[in-house]
Image (cartoon, rainbow, N blue to C red):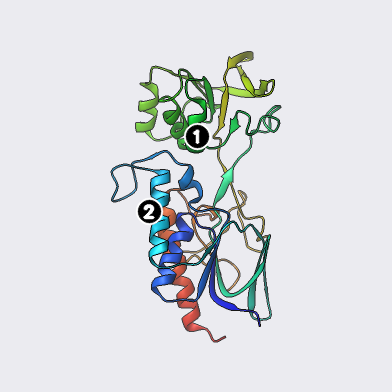
């Protein structure tokens, strides 16, 4: 006989983990399925805006999240890649790459993934100098020149990590100025080894076996910047392809109301995969708690 859960949470980033903690406190029969633990938090460098911690790194905060789940004995199955969700015969069926699960309610907290540059050399040099995570791969480029692509907070975070390790950090931004937090911009501009290229566009990533340079175009002129590493930080794409039946906005984000309800009854969503403004760790946590409480309320007011 197929086991039917009260709730299945898909994703174990800040939103999914917080939803799981709240579900555990409500004594729900639930399961967490995720591709990884921590989501984007695990990629983050220095975090200075998470309440209760004046300073903590992304990996450290991820460990705190994981310890919180372990305290409640929460069942987490990793890695599980979501393939699709179907609602039929009074059950919401969650299909992953390895198994199928049945639940009365579901919370989608699958987050976002890095946006690709889509320039010559990016695909060829992936994991050979091209990376999307400074926290994960930054130490590999110690004492080597690198390029960080982007002008927002994720690019600034990556650049601030790399100025501690690399003799030269090129920050390549295709707008007129950097557009992240002023404190981060100030720190970067005061760095002696950071070189900011505004109104610049990456045209190609070059090398032999590994990355050796980035070709940049600025005001009609092309320049070849020597770099052994390229950190692509140009934004994120929501992981919402597996739920095409849910209403999404032009960016592909799942549309939710203030109770984290989607357009399908019993299906909730939380965190960066949704249209909630301001993608921040603390906001994702709050949204995860709301989604879990909404799922509990739904279970309490419906007959199955």
**Relative depth, front residue between 226 and 149:** 226
**Relative depth, front residue between 79 and 205:** 79
Image quadrant where residue 266 sits? bottom right
**Relative depth, front residue between 63 and 204:** 63
Looking at marks 2 and 1 on the same chain, the residue that comes earlier in the sequence is marked by 2
For label 1, the residue is 134
Whether residue 268 appears in this view of the structure is: no
- At 41% across and 51% down in the image, what residue appears? 63
Q: Which numbered dot is residue 64?
A: 2
Q: Is residue 192 left or right of residue 134?
A: left
**Residue 182 x/y as whole percent:** 37, 32
**Relative depth, front residue between 160 and 247:** 160
Which class describes the residues within 10 Å of circle 1: few (<14), some (14-19), or many (20+)? many
Q: Given contact means CB atoms under 8 Å apart, are the residues at marks 2 and 1 in contact?
A: no
Q: Which numbered dot is residue 167?
A: none
Quadrant showing the C terminus: bottom right
- At 61% across and 52% down in the image, what residue appears? 239
**Residue 155 x/y as whole percent:** 49, 33
**Residue 114 x/y as whole percent:** 58, 41
- At 71% across and 30% down in the image, what residue appears? 124
Q: Dot 1 lies on which element?
A: helix
Residue 87, compared with residue 183, is above or below; it is below
Count of all numbered marks drawn on residues in the image: 2
Between marks 2 and 1, how big is the CA–CA gap?
20 Å
Q: Is residue 2 left or right of residue 112?
A: right
């Amino acid at each position: 006989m197929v086991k039917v859960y009260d709730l299945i949470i898909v994703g174990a980033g800040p939103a999914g983990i917080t939803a799981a903690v709240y579900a555990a406190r409500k004594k729900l029969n639930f399961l967490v399925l995720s591709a990884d633990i921590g989501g984007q938090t695990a990629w983050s460098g220095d975090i200075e805006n998470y309440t209760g911690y004046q300073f903590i790194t992304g990996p450290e905060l991820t460990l705190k999240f994981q310890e919180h789940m372990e305290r409640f004995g929460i069942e987490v199955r990793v890695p599980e890649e979501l393939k699709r969700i179907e609602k039929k015969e009074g059950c919401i069926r969650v299909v992953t790459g390895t198994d199928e699960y049945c639940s009365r309610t579901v919370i989608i907290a699958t987050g976002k993934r890095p946006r690709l540059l889509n320039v010559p050399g990016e695909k060829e040099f992936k994991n050979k100098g091209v990376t999307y995570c400074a926290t994960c791969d930054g130490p590999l480029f110690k004492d080597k020149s690198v390029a960080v692509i982007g002008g927002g907070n994720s690019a600034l975070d990556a650049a601030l990590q790399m100025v501690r390790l690399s003799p030269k950090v090129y920050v390549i931004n295709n707008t007129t100025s950097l557009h992240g937090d002023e404190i981060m911009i100030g720190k970067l501009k005061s760095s002696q080894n950071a070189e900011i290229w505004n109104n610049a566009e990456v045209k190609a990533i070059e090398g032999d076996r590994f990355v050796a340079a980035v070709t940049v175009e600025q005001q009609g002129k092309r320049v070849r910047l020597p770099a052994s590493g390229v950190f692509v930080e140009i934004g994120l794409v929501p992981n919402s392809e597996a739920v095409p039946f849910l209403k999404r906005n032009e960016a592909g984000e799942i549309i939710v109301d203030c109770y984290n309800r989607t357009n399908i009854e019993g299906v909730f969503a939380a965190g960066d995969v949704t249209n909630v403004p301001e993608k921040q760790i603390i906001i994702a946590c709050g949204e995860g708690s709301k989604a879990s409480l909404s799922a509990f309320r739904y279970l309490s007011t419906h007959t199955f």
